[in-house]
Image (cartoon, grey):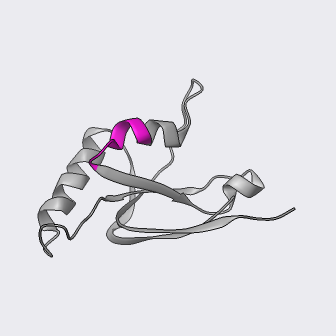
Amino acid sequence: MGVDYRSRFGIGYKISEKVFEDDTYMDQYLDDLCKDNYTYFETGEGSYTGYGNEWYICLKNPFEKTLDLSEQKDNLYNFLTDNNIEIIGDFGLQGGLHVY
């Protein structure tokens, strides 16, 4: 039995995983929520072990227009708070290894 893995990185926030009462999964929820504005990913070995993973929402193409991320950071923060997504930690480089 082999193990697959992928490195995932971005500039944004680590977020708390939501628990849904219906059959919705976190990746489905974030896919609908983020659309073309932001990117999301998970890290950890939870897909392999059955335990939870860490989730992140990051800027898509952060340096496309400018090197100053102040406005993009504020927009992402407002987006997360408007959608009741709990932020864990500070804005910055996020990521790790996703084992599945």
Q: Residue furthest right?
A: 1
Verify whether residue 35 appears in magenta: yes
Please name the residue shown 24% across and 54% down the image.
76
Specify the quadrant of the image occupied by residue 46.
bottom right
* Image height of 33 relative to 76, above or below: above
Residue 35, given in percent of the width and then of the height, sits at 33, 41
**Residue at horizontal 30 percent and vertical 47 percent from the top:** 80
Q: Look at the image and tell me in which quarter the N terminus lies.
A: bottom right
Outermost top residue: 22
Q: At 69% across and 58% down in the image, what residue appears? A: 100
Residue drawn at point x = 57 percent, y = 23 percent: 22
Residue 21 placement, left or right of 3: left
Front residue of 61 and 51 = 61
Query: Left or right: 97 with respect to 18?
Result: right
Q: Is residue 51 above or below residue 5?
A: above
Which residues are drawn in magenta? 31-37
Q: Is residue 9 magenta?
A: no
